[in-house]
Amino acid sequence: MSPADISASFEARQHAVSELRRLVEDADGSELNAEQQAEFERQNTAIDSLDARIRSGLDHIEREAKATAALDEFRAFGDLTTPHESAVDTKVDDETLFRQLVTGEIRSFTSLPSEQRDMTKGVATAGGNIVHSSMWDRIVDKLEEESQVVRAGATVINTAGGEDLLVPRVGTNPTGALVAEAGTIGESDAVIQQVSLGAFKYAALTQVSTELLSDSMFNVADFVTRIGGQAVTRALGTDLSNGSGSSKPKGIAQAATSFGTSATATTITYANLVEVEATMPIPYRTRETCWLMSPEAVKVIRLLTDDQSRPLWEPSLQAGNPDQLLGYSVYVDGNLDAATSGKRAVVFAHAPSYAVRLAGGLQVDRSEDFAFSSGLVTFRYQIHGDGDAIDTNGLGCLTQA
């Protein structure tokens, strides 16, 4: 509570006391009537509440004063409380830090997203070749490769810490209506919920021989980053697609609402796909909306034709661009279930309606003791992340019968 809040509480208390005095004066020695008695009790309750609020505020200020005094006393010791060296120089780039990690100069460091982005990094000739990327950036690139959910355009939230992140989630959108002149405007409230995004840990160990580390002709940083990063991002990507939400991220397939059910456990028809697409609310059918489906579902759908015997599947004519189905991009996700009973092999999603939370940076640690007898140096990679729907209206799926 700020000093201004405490001051406002004192003023409110004085006002309540004045009201009590007025009631007593109005009664002029006689008993209070029912209305006056109710007002008397209300003002007394208000005074009690304000007293508690004022006491809490004063206690808070007292604690802050003691903490400030303790900090001043701590700083008075000068050099005794000042660290003489830092484990990691934050001005040094990740390549240098990793070389120091390899040679044993440091035991760990955290790689964070690059802060500088000059020109356009997406195209090498337009600036990508001059942009320095951290190990974290390369891990995120790996995540885009391993997670079709991220690649499809899910909302990615980067946070410095790993405390629970409360994100507003739209349950039901408000509606508007035509209102005549001087007519009454009907109330339509949006249903706003909250989703809590945590920071589940994904880790991997990578071991490299001491002989390989001493080979100056070999780019150890790229090699270890590739295999270590692939391991942790693949594990996270699996749960972002199909995680249950119990002690792990809630994958996009499990966060989706069922927009339709197939006729049998293993079939997917043209009518099923049209039903799913038509059930998605129109405002969510945008260029950011796409299909995600398992490889087994793709095998079935690629054989489908429309009422004119034309294939529904439209292969991309440009390398790197996704194929199309009913006018929407298709991402083949090996982490989704096959088309079997009760499973969700086909997801139709407005990708930004699903959020991926990445907490902190990439933590890299080195140990020569873990596999000392084998002459191996062990590198440990850790990332923290979570995922869930932030707008349930934009996520749908086909449920197999």
Image (cartoon, rainbow, N blue to C red):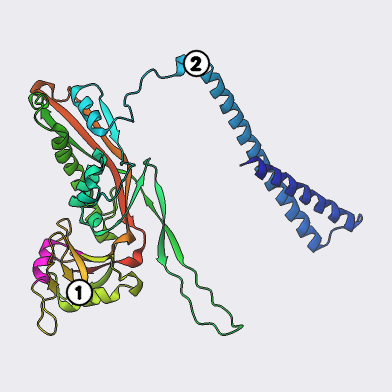
Q: Residues within 10 Å of mark 2 (few under 14, many from 20)?
A: few
Note whether residue 16 is visible.
yes
Kind of residue at disc 2: Gly
Kind of residue at disc 1: Leu
Q: Tell me which numbered mark, 2 or 1, is placed earlier along the sequence.
A: 2
Residue 150 coordinates in the image, percent (x, y): 25, 54
Note whether residue 401 is visible.
no
Give the labeled residue for mark 1.
326
Classify residue 22 by image quadrant.
bottom right
Residue 350 coordinates in the image, percent (x, y): 30, 65
Q: Is residue 387 magenta?
A: no
Q: Is residue 297 magenta?
A: yes
Q: Residues within 10 Å of mark 1 (few under 14, many from 20)?
A: some
**41 or 74, which lies in front?**
74
Label 2 sits on a secondary structure element that is: helix
When the figure is inspected, residue 369 is found, relative to residue 142, above or below; the finding is above
Residue 379 coordinates in the image, percent (x, y): 18, 31
Label 1 sits on a secondary structure element that is: loop
- Name the main secondary structure of what is drawn in magenta: helix
Residue 20 coordinates in the image, percent (x, y): 81, 52
Residue range (magenta): 292-302
Q: Residue at point 27% right, 32% down?
A: 93
**46 or 171, which lies in front?**
171
What distance separates the C-alpha of mark 2 from that of mark 1? Answer: 69 Å
Asked if the residues shown at circle 2 and circle 1 are in contact, with their CB atoms under 8 angstroms apart, the answer is no
Q: Residue furthest front?
A: 125
Q: Is residue 186 left or right of residue 371?
A: right
Q: How many marks?
A: 2
Viewport quadrant of the C terminus: bottom left
Q: Residue at point 11% right, 78% down?
A: 305
Give the labeled residue for mark 2.
78
